[in-house]
Every structure is written in C-alpha cells, then in structure tokens.
Image (cartoon, rainbow, N blue to C red):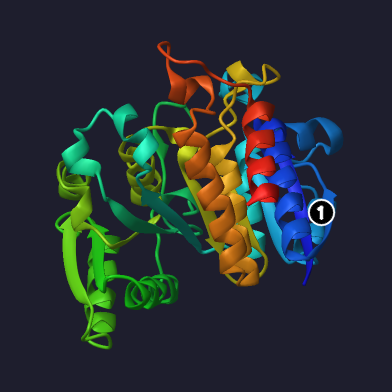
C-alpha cells in the first residue's frame, strides 16, 4: 500500500517526538512492504514566525491532499505570557480542526502492565481499564460566537452553541464504536444546568433507541469526573461535548500513569489527524528528554484508523509495551529510582524491536 502523510511537527517538543514516531512509521512500512511518502509543513508558533499565520494555506493544502496527518504539538511561552496577542499558536489548531472538518476526537485510555505502578491510583482500581473517549471537536464554547470583552475590559463572555447536526454525527459515531466494543455508551453532560446539554441528552436518547443492544447511561460531568477516578473499568465508550471532553481526557492520563502515554485521532469530513494529547512542553524542548510514546502510539492509530492496517498498528502497540517492560523509558516514567533514557533512545529501541520481531 502507498501511504501519503503530512507531517506537522509543531512547537516545543513536537519536532522531537514526531521524529521518533516517523522513524517507527518508516520501520513498519519497511517490514510490511508499504511505500511511504511524506512532506513536512509548519503549524503553530513556528508557522507564525515563518508566515505570520498559525495555520498557513500551504499547510492546509498539504493536509487536504494527504491520506493522514501526523501532528506534534502547538504552543509557545512567547504567546502564553502575552494576553494581548491577537495571533496565537492555538488558533492554528482550531483552524486545522475547522477547515478539515475534524468533528470527533478519539482518545483510547488503557493501562500498560509496566506502567501501572506510576499511576497515583491503586492498581486494583486501574488494572484492566480500557475505554474510549469521543469528544466533539468543532463546536461549543471554543468556537461559539459572540465572544469577547466589554469596552472597559471588565467583562468577558463566551457563547456555547450546538446544532442538532453536530450532536447527531458524533453520538452516532459513539454508538458505532460501542457496537465493536463492549456495547456501552456513557453520555456526559450538564443537562441540569445547560440548555446545550439538554439538547445533547434529548438527541442521545433518540439515537439510543436505534441501538437496542447498547447499554446507555447519562452522567453529569462532575459525577463522570469522580467516576473516572473511582471506577474507570465501568466505562466503555464515553461521548461528550468539546470542553468537557478536553478536561476529562486529560484527567484520564492519571489512569495510564503519564500524560505522555495518551494518543489520539481526530476524524471527520476530510483528512484525519493523529496526535499525542500532551502539549508542547517548551521547558523540555531540545533536551532530548520528552516521552515519545504517545506520538508513537498515535502513529499506531494512524495505521489502523486511516489505512485499516490493524496488524501494523498492533506491532507498534506491542513494541511500546515491550519497551516499558524492558525499562526503556524517558524520565517522566522512570522517575528517580531507575535509569531513564533519552527520547531518541526510546524511539530507536522500538524501531529495532519492530524490525526484529
């Protein structure tokens, strides 16, 4: 198979972790007999420096003509520390999602035997946890208008808007995934307070009737946040709106033991984007200490979701698990009591494992 991918390293540690994920992708293609073509383009702060825009037209055109996008991270202290900046790196991420029609973010949350001890939660709570969060990605507060501040600067406002179409397409997606898994959907909202949440719940009830085999439960977001920590094994497929999903999926990182372990896929109308959920971590940029595993696992999701190559995806997932069993991990996982490895050491170990197994 011919694989055409766009590579968007982004900011901070993005280039370092994407480099390792790309090396793993090359190794898998070589092993399984696929040809790989890729082109790199800027996005985020580096794109602003280069072009004045966080998501240049040339980058968008590359994404549109590619089969998949492998993406790193966006963000820079230069903009974080300037509340008056009118152009921000994060605008590039939102623009990419909107222009590519990426309405659904899929984040699997699973445990690795070699990493259970790193979670702050008891092993009996998290061992065996395996669920999927499906987050709506192009609506809600992050995209709602009007948005702004009063003339005197003392009042700020955001608007949360959802249409029936936006909700239907992602809730249906959640039920389709549940049918392939353990047939349970948890819809997270705040229907006791928010009008948008009541629309989410109403539509989900309608769609649930079309999937009688699937168990449906409704949780308020505060209860869901508590349940995710108390009994993560009770979830199968969680579906929710943009902001709630943003928060809950980061909370899910404590189950895996590290934010550097969570991959994601953003899918929708055009080219899908595969990225780690961690940020640009500028403090670690250039130090060769960042954890590349979430990005490498995102490459595994790319093989499965963009190209339907499940065996190739499994080879990456297995290699990552074996790297942790062998203790070939970066400092965020190793801690102070065991030896840690550099970013490129971890990536090279995984490449060699794939080539030899």
Residue 25 vs 47, above or below: the answer is below
User: Residue 347: where, in percent of width, then height?
Assistant: 66, 35
In this rendering, would 184 be left or right of 52? left
Q: Does any portion of residue 277 appear in the rendered image? A: no
The residue that appears at 21% across and 36% down in the rendered structure is: 123
Would you say 185 lies left or right of 348 here?
A: left
Query: Residue 178 appears at what percent x and percent y?
Result: 33, 72
Neighbor class of circle 1 (other Cα within 10 Å; few <14, some 14-19, many 20+) is few
Nearer to us in this view, 310 or 258: 310
Front residue of 18 and 163: 18
Q: Quadrant of residue 160?
A: bottom left
| Residue in the foreground of this view, choosing between 260 and 282 | 260
* Residue found at x 32% / y 57%: 131
Considering the image in quadrants, where does the N terminus appear? bottom right
Query: Which residue corresponds to mark 1?
Result: 57
Q: Is residue 137 above or below residue 156?
A: below
Give residue 152's position: percent from left, percent from top: 46, 26
Could you tell whether 101 is left or right of 50 in the image?
left
Q: Is residue 30 visible?
A: yes
Query: Residue placed farthest to the front in the image?
Result: 356
Instruction: Count every numbered label the image shows and give the total.
Output: 1
| Label 1 residue SS | helix
Q: Residue at x 29, y 68 (%)?
A: 200
Residue 264 lies left or right of residue 231; in this view the side is right
- The image shows residue 5 at horizontal and vertical percentages of 76, 58
* Quarter of the image where one finds residue 314: bottom right
């Amino acid at each position: 198979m011919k694989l055409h991918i766009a590579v968007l390293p982004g900011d901070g540690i993005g280039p370092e972790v994407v480099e390792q994920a790309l090396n793993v992708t090359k190794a898998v293609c070589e092993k399984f007999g696929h040809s790989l073509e890729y082109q790199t383009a800027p996005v985020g702060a580096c794109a602003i420096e280069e072009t004045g825009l966080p998501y240049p037209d040339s980058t968008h055109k590359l994404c549109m003509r590619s089969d998949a996008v492998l993406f790193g991270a966006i963000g820079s202290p230069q903009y974080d520390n300037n509340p008056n900046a009118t152009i921000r790196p994060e605008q590039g991420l939102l623009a990419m999602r909107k222009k590519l029609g990426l309405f659904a973010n899929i984040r699997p949350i699973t445990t690795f035997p070699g990493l259970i001890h790193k979670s702050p939660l008891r092993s009996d709570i998290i061992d065996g946890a395996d669920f999927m969060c499906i987050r709506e990605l192009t609506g809600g507060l992050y995209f709602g208008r009007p948005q702004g501040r009063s003339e005197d600067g003392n009042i700020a406002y955001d608007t949360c808007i959802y249409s029936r179409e936006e909700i239907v397409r992602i809730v249906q997606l959640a039920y389709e995934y549940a049918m392939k898994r353990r047939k349970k959907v948890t819809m997270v909202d705040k229907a006791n307070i928010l009008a948008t949440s009541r629309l989410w719940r109403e539509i989900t009830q309608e769609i649930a009737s079309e999937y009688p085999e699937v168990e449906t439960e409704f949780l308020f977001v505060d209860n869901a946040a508590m349940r995710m920590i108390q009994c993560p094994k009770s979830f199968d497929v969680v579906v929710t709106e943009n902001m709630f999903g943003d928060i809950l999926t980061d909370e899910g990182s404590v189950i895996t033991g590290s934010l550097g372990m969570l991959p994601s896929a953003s899918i929708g109308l055009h080219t899908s984007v595969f990225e780690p959920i961690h940020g640009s971590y500028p403090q670690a940029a250039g130090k060769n200490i960042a954890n590349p595993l979430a990005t490498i696992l995102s490459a595994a999701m790319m093989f499965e979701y963009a190209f339907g190559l499940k065996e190739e995806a499994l080879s990456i997932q297995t290699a990552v698990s074996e790297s942790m069993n062998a203790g070939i991990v970066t400092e965020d996982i190793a801690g102070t009591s065991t030896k840690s490895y550099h970013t490129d050491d971890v990536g090279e170990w995984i490449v060699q494992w794939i080539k030899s197994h």
